[in-house]
Amino acid sequence: MAEKVVVGMSGGVDSSVAAYLLKKQGYDVIGVTMQIWQSDDVCSLENKGGCCGVSAVEDARRVASVIGIPYYVMNFKNEFRENVIDYFANSYRRGETPNPCIACNRYVKWEALLNRALALGADYIATGHYAKISKLTNGRYTIANSVTAAKDQTYALYNLTQEQLSHTLLPIGDYEKPRVRAIAEEAGLPVASKPDSEEICFVPDGDYAKFLRENYNISEKPGNFIDEEGNILGGHRGIIHYTIGQRKGLGIAFGKPMYVKEIRPDDNTVVLSDNEGLFKRHVTAGNVNFMAYSYDELIKMAGKGYEFTGKVRYNHKGDTCKIRLVKMPVGPETREIKIQADFEKGVRAPAPGQALVIYDKEGNVACGGTITGGNLADGI
């Protein structure tokens, strides 16, 4: 009997080709679109073909018909609201820069979908992400770089668990985007030329401040821009309008380029600096997920001075770093593992709330976590 795989179909070309390739490989394929939109007025991408738009259902259904696989729409509204949209809003309250795609991958596209797929008797789930899964000699699963650096999505998948990886197939990790479109064209899939969706699906107009104000009652409280010495430089519109590294949209002319260096929600201030002030040699992250290596294995590697590559944002090409792992006290009997990446030359604008993802020399995701601050030696 063929192994059964549930493919998350967004209505785009990547997930459509993933389903097509798995069917050709002999799997018993079931197509599923995850209904995550909250309401037509909050999340309607019908004209843009986004991953959560109503049109995604029609596109995915047409593809499933061409491939010849059963297709269903499953409701994941609550999971998406709790794990992605609420997380997004709460991060902005804390002055962080959230990455909703990472949260969606971990808790919705994998945890929620996998649980439902396994309950239906499936062996695997699959998506159209540009990445590879491999099992290392130490017995652990890892996400590895795809063949196309331009579309590589390992950064956004660093938080997947060993259990999730063991039940996951990523069939397009061996292909570059032009070849994926060519496969779709050759197979007669109706989404072969459909453009990629890049916006955050639940904020289609890109106005985060408006979304947070209207849906979470997060006010745009004006405050002060200050420099690194604490001197007031002018007024800002509210911290939800800014992110680390931002230059445009500050609303004030300073006579030289100035950038957002730090956001301080406690006193509602935004710290500005020149470009040089954005670089940090030490980047610390919590909520660490261990992927290619266990905690003990990474401790040994770090102790021997192993050089990793660290990425602090999706489009960061990565820089060489060494790491250290520390168990920080968070209670009388509990410790939280934090990871610190030490970059020799420093990295530009690491933002709290974004991810620090660590790769080994073979391009495997070693581990990753949520950026919290700077040097552990300073008690951060």
Image (spheres, rainbow, N blue to C red):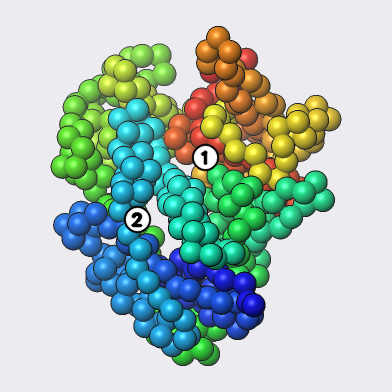
Q: What residue type is disc 1 on?
A: Ala
Q: Label 1: which residue?
A: 355
Q: Identity of the amino acid at label 2?
A: Phe
- At a point 19% along the width and 42% down the height, the residue shown is 215
Query: In the figure, is residue 304 to the left or right of 53?
Result: right
Q: Is residue 113 left or right of residue 55?
A: right
**Residue at screen point 26% across, 68% down:** 54
The answer to whether one can see residue 190 in this image is yes
Quarter location, residue 312: top right
Q: Residue at x 19, y 26 (%)?
A: 222
Percent across and percent down for residue 194 are 39, 77
Horizontal side, residue 267 vs residue 28: left or right: left
Q: Quadrant of the N terminus?
A: bottom right
**Disc 1 element:** strand
Camera-nearest residue between 133 and 82: 82
In space, the residues marked 2 and 1 are separated at their CA atoms by 25 Å
Numbered mark located on residue 76 in the image: 2
Vertical relation: 120 (above or below) 95: below
Q: Residue at x 47, y 81 (%)?
A: 69
